[in-house]
Image: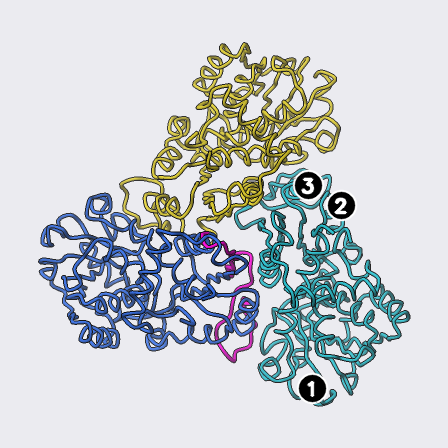
Chain colours: A blue, B yellow, C cyan
Amino acid sequence: MKHFLDLAQLKRGEIAELLTLARRLEARPEPRALTGKILGLLFLNPSLRTLSSFQAAMARLGGSSFVVTPGHGTWQFETRDGIPMDGSAAEHVREGIPVLSSYCDVLGIRAFAEGRDLAADLADRQFLAMQALSDKPVVNLESAINHPCQALADWKTLDDLAVPEHSRFVLSWVPHPRALPLAVPAAILDMAARRGHEVVVLRPDGFALPGALMTKARAVAAESGGSVTETEDPAALEGARIVYAKEWGSTRHYGDADADAALRARFKHWQLTDQTLKRCASDCRVMHCLPVRRNVAIADEVLDGPRSVVLAEARNRLTVQIAVLYRLLASA
Amino acid sequence: MKHFLDLAQLKRGEIAELLTLARRLEARPEPRALTGKILGLLFLNPSLRTLSSFQAAMARLGGSSFVVTPGHGTWQFETRDGIPMDGSAAEHVREGIPVLSSYCDVLGIRAFAEGRDLAADLADRQFLAMQALSDKPVVNLESAINHPCQALADWKTLDDLAVPEHSRFVLSWVPHPRALPLAVPAAILDMAARRGHEVVVLRPDGFALPGALMTKARAVAAESGGSVTETEDPAALEGARIVYAKEWGSTRHYGDADADAALRARFKHWQLTDQTLKRCASDCRVMHCLPVRRNVAIADEVLDGPRSVVLAEARNRLTVQIAVLYRLLASA
Amino acid sequence: MKHFLDLAQLKRGEIAELLTLARRLEARPEPRALTGKILGLLFLNPSLRTLSSFQAAMARLGGSSFVVTPGHGTWQFETRDGIPMDGSAAEHVREGIPVLSSYCDVLGIRAFAEGRDLAADLADRQFLAMQALSDKPVVNLESAINHPCQALADWKTLDDLAVPEHSRFVLSWVPHPRALPLAVPAAILDMAARRGHEVVVLRPDGFALPGALMTKARAVAAESGGSVTETEDPAALEGARIVYAKEWGSTRHYGDADADAALRARFKHWQLTDQTLKRCASDCRVMHCLPVRRNVAIADEVLDGPRSVVLAEARNRLTVQIAVLYRLLASA
């Protein structure tokens, strides 16, 4: 494993091996495995879990980290090619990335979608261009269309809970004050299909996931023995073993904040409540990547109730990232 | 010692033991005591000393730290319960705290008073609610009504200077451009009473410390052989061995910034100067927790003069925090 | 070596020794040399390379770092003496520096020029006042008029490339949207003169480097066998082995942003392009300290072409800083 960019780049067996490694390092820590190694963390967007769990992961393995946050003590970054840099950005990624890469052994990069050009975001053009500028292993800390650390942590959480691989997994759109990127829904759709679930994407009209994502997920499901469908009918929750709640922007109005706002205002009742969950399986679990807007996306009663496993998911971020860093950096 | 939240939770002998431990680790450092351990630092408010001295303390003991600063590279935190999170805060403490807690071995939390509801601030409701969300030991890095690291460091500074336990200790209000919280005056009032001093709170009309704090301090003084009084008469400085200068908001106008500003404008002459100190004991020392507004709260002549021990206090922050972390984390 | 403040404080032989040490530690790392040691990093201005490479340097030597960035999670700093602090700055350097210094073994300070009073900036008054407040070794992370880490890294880059010591070195002004400080041009002028180059400062009318800097550089050159001249005639590029591009403000209008803006608007064609470089030696190299405004200061074609060594310079920041920290802190 040269980089950690996308779960789709790993074979099913490699994912299983990573999860086994995560469990092994949880049971028998190796506090000197990465002595002297350095993780560089570049955050072009805010973070809580990723920021702290990656530093903790390096520390648990005996290594070090540094954090760079353009706009907060560091020059703002320019990502566009070929333009005259006469605006507020002082540093171009064409210098910034190779320089940071030369100061560390592995570089984590967070760069959310720009949210203007759907095709560019779906192709993860900006992130892949940045990744290509690094001569060190790169970890995707969430790009325009992916969040492999979250997907891997969630896979482990499903394993921890012994959720059957072919059970019904509903990826449910939930409300948010603003249009959020597609990275997590895309990564979770792929993960659930890859694990073999009967995946249903439940979303209001105007919020369908892009066809390219659905097609790819169906191909993945075909191999794993799962399935992928989509609907706006909450009846899809019937028998669901997992409800994975996630906010995302309207794909019908991608990049049009006003039209998105007008449309999403009509779906505030999609908030996940105990009432919503009544249709689900009796042992249904509620997942979310966090941060979550309480009483907007998910009601307190759900987050504080017995079905929520959102904290277990967050704890697994640390567990799986320790394995990812170990695999990338520990000398065989 | 499970947490470090309040000096009042420690018996006199336990405080003495912590200070002895601090001296021992100063004389004979243990650079591997906390190898592999992680301190999480959550700052909901700005910091200089606490931010850097806690990281230094972990490093001196062989451990690591990570820093999370909502609003500066991390989502803003919501602390209120039961509300719909449709504003600027994306992360609720009900998720944020348990998540951070799961990534570290001890969690430091700074959360200043909201300054609106005196009863809520006096009860330290917000901080205690946050602390209860952590399943790891918590260190109070300054809450609405407490700052135990400052109080412990100041106790050590008094010991270092061999200030007699029953000497006169004047906690003197000094001016500031804005209303500051009660955390430090509350913590220092308690500490000085606990150490057995003849404590006088010297403050202008309208700035009396809340009765609950005074009553608690008097009870503490009754046990330690000290006393606690209050006055607006500068004659109280007569014979003072310590003048502890501190800014705080008007308690008469708690939460009313305009009325506070109008009132405090009348007391700019309460700035601590060499003239003020003429009444004090010849070996009087001036203390302050820092940061200090020079020539507003305390004149240059005092801070740069022989009576000031503010830098010694700040250095003792590191010394005592090493002991606190050691006590919380070092395996027996 | 007690501090690392200015290349001019080192004898030629000491610089050579530092560079030899840098190469030795690159070839044979000493990952435990600074175990338990702490570097404090105080940034009064933004940073990318310095921020990350100094943390990486400490980690490579087994030590730790903490970062303090006033205005980003830490109180704003006041540097002026004798004023009443009734503005936005809560912490005076007279407290801030000694306190930070007491928490670490070496303190790095970045404090750019204020850009108002040329004489004060040339004398590096603010930085030297801050340095004097530290009782620990201080590293200059870029002050009003110096950037010794950049100068030393660039010297190593010239050595790495085997650029002859007496070859032609053109320090060329290039455009920027705003007036930038004189620190880098001053440090590079001195470094190139010190290395023995035939230095030419190429700049438009109104952007001459201050006479004091030129005079000092000529004295240095007289000792090293080099020379220092200045011109606004691009014919100076003829035969140049190095073009060191750098942006700086108009010295004619120092501190007058409007007059500076009006003047610099006339010199946008000073952008460094392949066309500019046609006059240079065939093996000419282009240097820049970064960050660089692409297609404003230097064209893409140059930065992405074979002559640019800007990434090598940045990598050498880490290499030489490891040597500086080792020299300051490693027990003999």
Q: Position of residue C260 (x, y in %)?
A: 70, 67
Q: Position of residue B211 (x, y in %)?
A: 45, 17
Q: Give the spatial CA distance, label 1 vs label 2.
A: 44 Å
Whether C217 is drawn above or below B19: the answer is below
Whether B84 is drawn above or below A122: the answer is above
Circle 1 or circle 2, nearest the eye: 2
Q: Are marks 1 and 2 in contact (CB under 8 Å)?
A: no
Circle 3 or circle 1, nearest the eye: 3
Q: Nearer the viewer, residue B136 or A118?
A: B136
Per the image, the residue denoted by label 1 is: C277
Classify the position of the N terminus of chain A by image quarter.
bottom left
Tell me the SS state at disc 2: helix
Q: Amino acid at mark 1?
A: Leu
Chain part drawn in magenta: A60-89
- Which chain is mark 3 on? C
Per the image, the residue denoted by label 2 is: C132
> Relative to C179, is B140 on the left or the right?
left
Q: Give the spatial CA distance, label 3 vs label 1.
A: 48 Å
Per the image, the residue denoted by label 3 is: C98
Report crowding for label 3: few under 14, some 14 to 19, many 20 or more residues within 10 A (C-alpha): many
Q: Is residue C293 visible?
A: yes
Q: Give the spatial CA distance, label 2 vs label 3.
A: 9 Å
Q: Amino acid at mark 3?
A: Pro
Whether B332 is drawn above or below B17: the answer is below
